[in-house]
Image: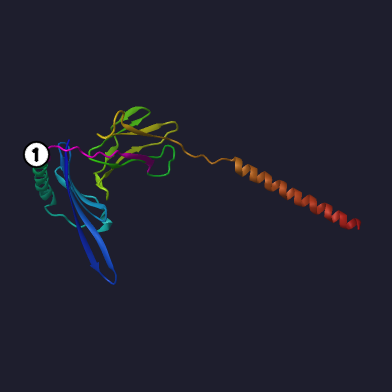
Amino acid sequence: MELYGILLLFTVIVSTRAQVVHSDFRLTGCSDTEEEVLFGTDGEELWHSDFIRKEGVMTVPEFADPMSFPNFYESAVANLEICKQNLALDIEVYKNPVEQLDLPEMSIYSEDDVELNVENTLICHVTGFFPPPVRVSWTKNNEILTEDVSLSQYRLKSDGTFNIFSTLKFTPAGGDIYSCTVNHKSILGQPKTKTWDVDVAVPSVGPAAFCGVGLTLGLLGVATGTFFLIKGNNCN
């Protein structure tokens, strides 16, 4: 599989009492299985195209006063066609050179502190891989999950590799074990898997009890010493 991508960086300087530099970017990528067009600034995505639903998706919250992108989806479709034409030309010219492969790294964690029977979200962060795509899947107690699972857009890193996030909505129950599995063309043999088990910390009464006993004995010791000191003085 071949991947072709274009990354354009635009530097904007806002003149105030101090100069603030922002970097805007546009990413267009295509392969025989992947299609991606997105815009962002300072490493954060602002907008991406959804070629399945055939619309643009604004990814910044309303309170951030997001700008509008009129006709950006139509422009993304046109740019994607150019990307595919360039990809075909590159394949013909470069005769399919050996492609650099970077192995993905994985981590899995919960969005919020874990409480039993309280809905939460598991996040599987896959980073440092090249080229896209990666395939991400979830299991619970070795059973494959397909519902309440989402996958983010690919995020380009400064070193040319990619990040992606997969999330799973779940309700923790004691003893449950979840796993996130990633498959990528750079992985030889079995796909990479990270597991996560429901482990809710229960406060221990041991330290509190020991502290209470120690404090009580200490006070008794002080009282006993004071009693004998008073008795000794009376004898004198």
Position in image of residue 196 (x %, y %): 40, 35
Picture coordinates of residue 120, whole percent (x, y): 37, 41
| Residue plotted at (49% across, 40% down) | 201
Asked which quadrant contains residue 141, the reply is: top left
Which residue is disc 1 drawn over? 92
* Occupied quadrant, residue 101: top left
**Way the structure is coloured:** rainbow
Q: Quadrant of residue 143?
A: top left
**In this view, which residue lies farthest toward the right?**
236
Q: Residue at x 65, y 45 (%)?
A: 212
Amino acid type, label 1: Glu
Q: Does the stretch in magenta take in 17?
A: no
Which quadrant, please, contains the C terminus?
Answer: bottom right
Q: Position of residue 53 (x, y in %)?
A: 16, 41
Please provide the residue range marked out in magenta.
Answer: 93-110
Q: Position of residue 87 (x, y in %)?
A: 12, 42
Residue 198 left/right relative to 45: right
Q: Residues within 10 Å of mark 1 (few under 14, many from 20)?
A: few
Residue 176, placed above or below residue 67: above
The secondary element bearing badge 1 is classed as helix
Residue 62 placement, left or right of 218: left
Residue at position x 29%, y 30% in the image: 188
Asked if residue 89 lies left or right of residue 207, the reply is left
Q: Count numbered badges in the picture.
A: 1
Instruction: Tell me the quadrant of the picture where the N terminus can be found.
Output: top left
